[in-house]
Image: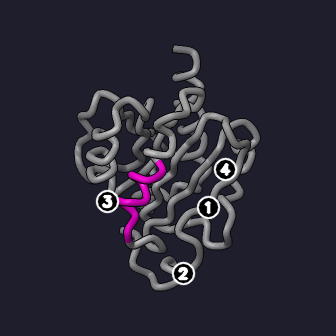
């Protein structure tokens, strides 16, 4: 099990973003706190050419639940923007609860390695290759591939 309480994970920005303003938004709620250096992980940068990525680093944002609520509320009046949420592991249940209070704003929640069963109709578990690390970091290439595949599938349905 990964240690999400490393002091270094709590340093740096609480939220980083990349991608075109006004584009579909992917809100990544990261319990591991990647994106330490004020930019999204390199594996996600190609995706930021077409979608806006807002990366919330939970260890660096102690009030992360209110930050999620704020980000979701900012999208309330922008009907052009489609919003998908990505999260993992120990906070998956909390994220599903938060998103459930904004059903009109979020198209889907993509969950990597949830610690609890995912039963919400708007949620999808992202499969990945077997790994000794659980949950897989959200910057892992297998996670990015799963997210891209899920987003592509949602665009065509």
User: Residue sitting at 41 percent across and 58 percent down?
Assistant: 135
User: Residue sitting at 35 percent across and 56 percent down?
Assistant: 89
Question: Where is residue 26 drawn, in percent x and y?
Answer: 55, 42
Separation of marks 3 and 2 at Cα, in angstroms: 20 Å
What SS does tag 2 mark?
loop
Give the labeled residue for mark 4.
44
Give the labeled residue for mark 2.
11
Separation of marks 4 and 2 at Cα, in angstroms: 21 Å
Instruction: Find the residue positioned furthest to the top.
Output: 157
User: Residue sitting at 44 percent across and 81 percent down?
Assistant: 6
Question: Where is residue 113 drawn, in percent x and y?
Answer: 37, 50
From the viewer's perspective, is the residue at label 3 or at label 1 nearer?
A: 1
Give the labeled residue for mark 3.
90
What SS does tag 1 mark?
strand
Is the residue under label 3 in contact with that under label 4 (CB below 8 Å)?
no
Task: State yes or no: residue 107 in magenta.
Answer: no
């Amino acid at each position: 099990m990964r240690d999400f309480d490393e002091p270094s994970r709590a340093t740096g920005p609480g939220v980083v973003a990349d991608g075109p303003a006004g584009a579909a938004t992917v809100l990544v709620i990261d319990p591991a706190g990647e994106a330490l250096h004020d930019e999204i992980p390199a594996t996600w940068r190609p995706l930021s050419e077409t979608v806006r990525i807002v990366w919330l680093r939970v260890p660096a944002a102690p009030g992360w639940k209110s930050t999620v609520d704020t980000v979701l509320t900012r999208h309330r009046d922008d009907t052009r923007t489609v919003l998908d949420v990505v999260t993992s592991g120990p906070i998956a249940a909390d994220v599903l609860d938060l998103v459930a209070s904004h059903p009109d704003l979020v198209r889907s929640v993509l969950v990597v390695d949830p610690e609890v069963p995912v039963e919400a109709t708007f949620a999808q578990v992202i499969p990945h290759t077997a790994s000794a690390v659980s949950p897989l970091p959200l910057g892992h290439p297998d996670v990015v591939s799963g997210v891209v595949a899920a987003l592509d599938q949602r665009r065509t349905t």
